[in-house]
Image: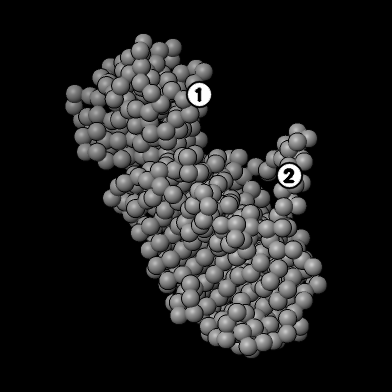
Amino acid sequence: MRRPVALRLQAALGTLALAAAAGVVLTMPGAASAAAGGATGYATQNGGTTGGAGGQTVRATTGTAIHEALCGRASSSTPITIEVEGTINHGNTSKVSGDSCNTAADKIELKQVSNITIVGVGNGAVFDQLGIHIRESSNIVIQNVTVRNVKKSGSPTSNGGDAIGMESDVRNVWVDHTTLEASGGESEGYDGLFDMKDNTQYVTLSYSTLRNSGRGGLIGSSESDRSNGYVTFHHNLYENIDSRAPLLRGGIAHMYNNHYKSLNESGINSRAGAKAKVDNNYFEDSKDVLGTFYTDQAGTWQVSGNIYDNVTWSEPGEDNNPAGPDPQSNTTVSIPYSFTLDDASCVPSVVSATAGADKGLKVSDGSCTPQSPDPTDPTDPDPTDPDPTDPPSGTNLSLGAGSDGSSKASGTSYGNVRDGDLGTYWSPAGTTGSISVKWSSATTVAKINIREAAGSEGTVGSYRVVDHGTGAVLASGSGAGVIGFSPVSLEKITFEITGASGTPRIAEFETYAG
């Protein structure tokens, strides 16, 4: 008998505990350094999904820094790519206010915004017990991140228990190469891994892993919520999921080349007039993988090329209409975009090599052989562009300028950040504070270089760069180094440190015209 998700998870956690006790260090493959590839499936329709392409790129290591990046844009639709590294949790995520954002402290909030990419980089990005909420927003890309253990009850709670949740007039979202996981079902405090409701359309979930949850996800919150749809699921792994893989109420969904393994109670649940196109998937060690379940309001499906490996089927009943044991189509679905199918027989191996975060963003081209992303993809940085961490060229405008700040630690001076001497430095009287460089007349600045003193490298966390005269946020992100922005004429520029791992020591605050 197959055990429900909570019991099955205990065995896996026991294995990890033994490994930890033995001193085994589990490492992940290196993550990609930037958003890569282009949207697929229904996310290519309705004008397409490009996220923050063409906008500024910033780095964030806290949830607060993510919110600051959103709030630091010129408008709520200014394109931005936020590269995330490290663990994002309740302890480092707070509400940030601004005209271009609408954030909250208990989740990553993408509300009433557009043209945003959030991508995991470096050693990986983990959203721990903190969900991602998309509301009244459009053109969003989420790539190469892990979201785990988001709860709706217990402590701490976030996002109604959804790893990624979308609601209220959401359009064009592409979620790619993510790992979405829980540690049990509703009785353990968890809800859905990937939920869409209240008029959410043109969404693609690709190359992702969804596991160890009572509920995989839903499209439509009730039998009357039929305004959602046009959703594509491809090359995903659903593993140890009790039900909702997904639950589809109304609308159209296309599932192809997914590997469904250990669906404990039911799988694709098409109901309330929904249409599901189900192509070349591999269903393994599962129960009732397709049909209408827990309702008398039927949905339909079109099936082709699927493999059913050790799948059991229930007898039909008043509120259950399983599609098997020999699933046949009872509708037709027209797909408006092009796609190439892998043969179902190779789906387990292809999905194993490609699905989830920190897999190198590998994809399939229909040949049953995983492919690395094209290094010349137009969404990647131009290989001819200079490294943004290279020291700026030209005159350091801070030399000979003035300076002040919010506070200074004993033995330090504001002037130490503009004296050209890396042996002297300014520190705030605490872990956060601001330092400014100022001139007697308007000066054009387009780039700054924040240089930390020896021994304190990496202390600076989240920051904002502000035009002191107007209050405009010129840039935001995380970590010291070279920071570029659109050229601006000003008399005073401020570097605000809003998060740090200790007391920062800023040796030089260099400013450049270009």
Q: Residue at x 49, y 67 (%)?
A: 196
Q: Secondary structure at mark 1?
A: loop
Q: Residue at x 55, y 75 (%)?
A: 248
Q: Residue at x 41, y 55 (%)?
A: 110
Percent from the top left, x then y, of residue 237?
Answer: 68, 62
Q: Nearer the viewer, residue 485 or 328?
A: 328
Q: Earlier in the sequence, mark 2 or mark 1?
A: 2
Q: Quadrant of the C terminus?
A: top left
Q: How many marks?
A: 2
Check disc 1: other Cα within 10 Å, few if <14, some if 14-19, many if 20+: some
The answer to whether residue 463 is above or below residue 224 is above
User: Which amino acid, by three-letter code, is at mark 1?
Assistant: Glu
According to the image, label 2 marks what residue? 16
Percent from the top left, x then y, of residue 48?
Answer: 46, 66
Q: Nearer the viewer, residue 254 or 12?
A: 12
Tell me the quarter of the picture where residue 406 sits.
Answer: top left
The answer to whether residue 456 is above or below residue 471 is above
Percent from the top left, x then y, of residue 131?
Answer: 50, 53
Can residue 365 be seen here?
no
Check disc 2: other Cα within 10 Å, few if <14, some if 14-19, many if 20+: some
Q: Nearer the viewer, residue 59 or 94?
A: 94
Tell me the quarter of the picture where residue 308 sits.
Answer: bottom right
Q: Residue at x 57, y 66 (%)?
A: 217
Q: Nearer the viewer, residue 53 or 154?
A: 154
Q: Answer whether labels 2 and 1 touch (C-beta < 8 Å).
A: no
User: Which is in the foreground here, disc 2 or disc 1?
Assistant: 2
The answer to whether residue 127 is left or right of residue 213 is left
Q: Which mark is residue 457?
A: 1
The answer to whether residue 376 is left or right of residue 114 is right
Q: Quadrant of the N terminus?
A: bottom right
User: Which amino acid, by three-letter code, is at mark 2?
Assistant: Leu
Tell me the quarter of the picture where residue 311 sits.
Answer: bottom right
